[in-house]
Amino acid sequence: MRITHRQLEAYIQFMETGSVTAAAERMGLSQPAMSKILAGLEIDLALTLFERKRKRLIPTHQAQLLYKEVRRLFASLSDVERFARDLRDLRSGELRVVSAASIGHTLVADALVAFAEANPAISVTLDVSSVVGSDVLGQNVDIGFSVSHFHHPDLLTEPLFHADAVCVMRHDHPLASRAVVGPRDLDGAEFISFTRNSRMRHLTDAVFEQQRISRKMRVEVFSSVEANALVSRGLGIAIVEPMTVHQGLWPGLVARRFEPTITFTFNAIVSRNRPVSPLTRAFLAELRGRIAALARGDDPRAAASLSVRLPQRRTRDRNASGAVVTDEEGEAGKTIEDDDGEEGDQHADR
């Protein structure tokens, strides 16, 4: 027994109209064709659905019970079709985002709030994590954001923007009066550094080692968020990525440009093993719009020390000015929409 959608549709039309002729007109069929479909349904189900009296079909009790079940199934199909339309039109669904704290507490949070307000039927989840790469690899989320560029065959990493590190201190620190701070200004200073195995620690240490300048380093933190929290309470100075300070979230904290520059690249990460959903693409568009506004200087909350650039070219070389580039100043060539694969190693998320 293998019944078809068309047979059930014909059956519903007949039960609702009570006439083979009327049901046939609704479906754009001839009366003989409709009669043939209904007779075939009886045979396929091995049920007596109709009594035939004076050339009319009279539904049996079994037919009445079957009609209720078929109507319920058709209602479920309509629900599926409606849900599919909602997914297509972003009126339903779930967006799961994981982010390093540096961008998760700022740009990603701003974009997610705007996206949720514009799409009230969408469920959103934001997880600020130190293992963004692992979360995306495990396909526990739709997209991740990190300062690290993940070189993994199952991950696609797209540079979103580049920003220069800043030196943070309390507003009453002697160096707060300067527009630019350099390594020699921090000679012997109480310095909050990142953990020893972090890439940000290696890059910062390299700048001071090149100029043979020592700092007092007795405090280590995992991310810029912890560094800002300690500095704002008067414990030393730190060099951090700028996103966690540009909105003025830390009372008493000021940020000053640091030279030679240390440039951080903020990336979006997705799994190569699952398609990027329309919801994810729509959220990325919202985030990119905010990044572009920041790069143009259109965000009134941005600190004067914030320098944001959109990806333009790829290079891993040290430039002539001696600036250290943490990740590719990416050419906007390959994006999450255009995936061709890369390999390499992973880094911790800040």
Image: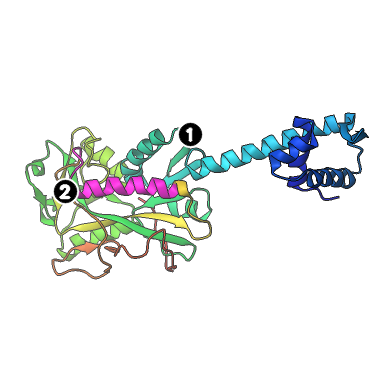
Q: Nearer the viewer, mark 2 or mark 1?
A: 1
Q: What are the residue bounds of the magenta stretch?
A: 280-301
Residue at 33%, 46% (x, y): give it.
Answer: 287
Q: Is residue 222 visible?
A: no
Q: Between disc 2 and disc 1, whose residue precedes?
A: 1
In the displayed image of the protein, which residue is found farthest to the left? 177
Compare residues 106 and 188 and report the one nearer the observer. 106
Residue 256, numbered circle: none
Q: Residues within 10 Å of mark 1 (few under 14, many from 20)?
A: some
Q: Is residue 204 placed above or below 57 in the rendered structure?
A: below
Residue at 18%, 68% (x, y): give it.
Answer: 319
Helix, strand or loop under label 1:
loop
Horizontal and vertical percent position of residue 2: 82, 50
Q: Is residue 40 visible?
A: yes
Residue tagged by mark 2?
Answer: 189
Indicate yes or no whether the magenta region holds residue 338: no
Q: Residues within 10 Å of mark 2 (few under 14, many from 20)?
A: some
Compare residues 274 and 145 and report the one nearer the observer. 274
Q: Amino acid at mark 1?
A: Ala
Compare residues 282 and 70 and report the one nearer the observer. 70
Residue at 48%, 66% (x, y): give it.
Answer: 153
Horizontal and vertical percent position of residue 52: 92, 35
Horizontal and vertical percent position of residue 127: 44, 42
Q: CA distance from mark 2 to mark 1?
A: 52 Å
Helix, strand or loop under label 2:
loop
Compare residues 210 and 179 and report the one nearer the observer. 179
Res 56 quadrant in image: top right
Residue tagged by mark 1?
Answer: 121
* Left or right placement of residue 12 versus residue 309 in this view: right
Q: How is the image coloured?
A: rainbow
Indicate yes or no whether the magenta region holds residue 297: yes
